[in-house]
Image (tube, grey):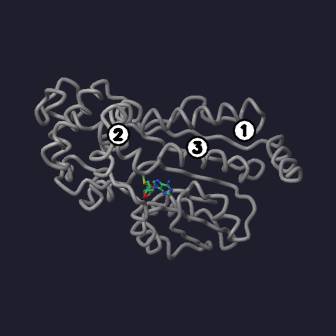
Amino acid sequence: MVDATIGQGGHSYLLGKTLGPEGVLIGLDVDKEAVRRAQFRLKDLACRVILCRSNFSQIAEQVHKQGIEKVDFILADLGVSSAQLSDVEMGLSFLEDAPLDMRIDKRLKTTAADIVNNTDEKTLADLIYKFGQDRGSRRIARFIVQHRKSEPITTTGQLASIACRALGRPGRKRRTRIHPATRTFQALRIAVNNELENLEKLLVSASGLLKRKGYIAVISFHSLEDRLVKNNFRQNERGGVYRIITKKPIVPGRDEIVENRRARSAKLRIAQKTEVGEQRSEKQKSDF
Ligand SMILES: C[S@@+](CC[C@H](N)C(=O)[O-])C[C@H]1O[C@@H](n2cnc3c(N)ncnc32)[C@H](O)[C@@H]1O
């Protein structure tokens, strides 16, 4: 099986326990620190554990590199972990004042500060609208551009206060239940880490990588991701490649949300590769 987002190794630990010594668990993560921590967490599993610091857009290459052609299960738990959200150096949270970075993979070149300080107003507004779905995107972009004329925007605190001023809602007093900077931060994080593009690549590779009757399970945290997953599964179902197991996504119950507030927007979708799907990917391979 492949855990495409190993994180703290929580899911992998539970799933890995179901694999015997013949089993192979491949874990991927772009965050070096996550790979290091998961290595420790998974050290006592009976199965073979192979962890790689890799983007899940490269899932097929990583699996094939291990001499494995197809897998029984692919899991992706998208987004960022609680550890990353509270890691000041990542600059992901508007609740802490930190450098405006947002790169989950430190090998990436462009930070959120680069985007905020060097993108023209219209492109910035479009980005905040497209990836943050914020109807105040034009105003936020205007306020950002005005602010950077006097000084560069380099911290999460600066950006959060600009978003609050732009939306006319100071700090945490607000008409909606979310902080005014939430959507701007989401938009920048998606842009910095190419999140949607990587997810699309993962979904495309996954259908070819799964064995017959193999499963793919994806947990998403916002509607842009969920839409990509839903559409990919539906398209594969129409093509006879997948059978969708979750007609509606599985969402956490009240108790789980009380225990873990960050789970509140999680949606889990599962699909299974069909026999026809397996024959098709075999045929594609021989045509190729
Ligand atoms: C929600 S956490 C996963 C938590 C994990 N399921 C656990 O049980 O601990 C998401 C993880 O995905 C990683 N990640 C995000 N985008 C990625 C990508 N494109 N490729 C690989 N890992 C990615 C993040 O670094 C983070 O560690």
- In the picture of the structure, the residue carrying the numbered disc 2 is 255
Give whichever of 13, 274 is nearer the camera. Answer: 274
From the top left corner, tell me how far across and down residue 145 is, in percent: 22, 37
Q: Secondary structure at mark 1?
A: strand
From the top left corner, tell me how far across and down residue 172 is, in percent: 14, 35
| Image quadrant where residue 108 sits | bottom left
Q: Amino acid at mark 2?
A: Asp
Q: Give the residue drawn at x 49%, y 71%.
A: 42
Picture quarter with ligand 1? bottom left
Distance between the alpha carbons at the discs numbered 3 and 1: 16 Å
Left or right, residue 114 beside residue 63: left
- In the picture of the structure, the residue carrying the numbered disc 3 is 200
Q: Amino acid at mark 3?
A: Glu
Above or below: residue 253 compared with residue 168:
below
Closer mark to the observer between disc 3 and disc 1 = 3
Badge 3 crowding class, 10 Å Cα cut-off, few under 14, some 14 to 19, many 20 or more, is some
Q: Which mark is residue 242?
A: 1
Q: Secondary structure at mark 3?
A: helix
Closer mark to the observer between disc 2 and disc 3 = 3
Left or right, residue 42 beside residue 238: left
Closer mark to the observer between disc 2 and disc 1 = 1
Q: Give the residue drawn at x 41%, y 44%.
A: 190
From the top left corner, tell me how far across and down residue 103 is, in percent: 37, 56
Above or below: residue 218 compared with residue 138:
below
**Which quarter of the rendered picture does the N terminus lie within?**
bottom right
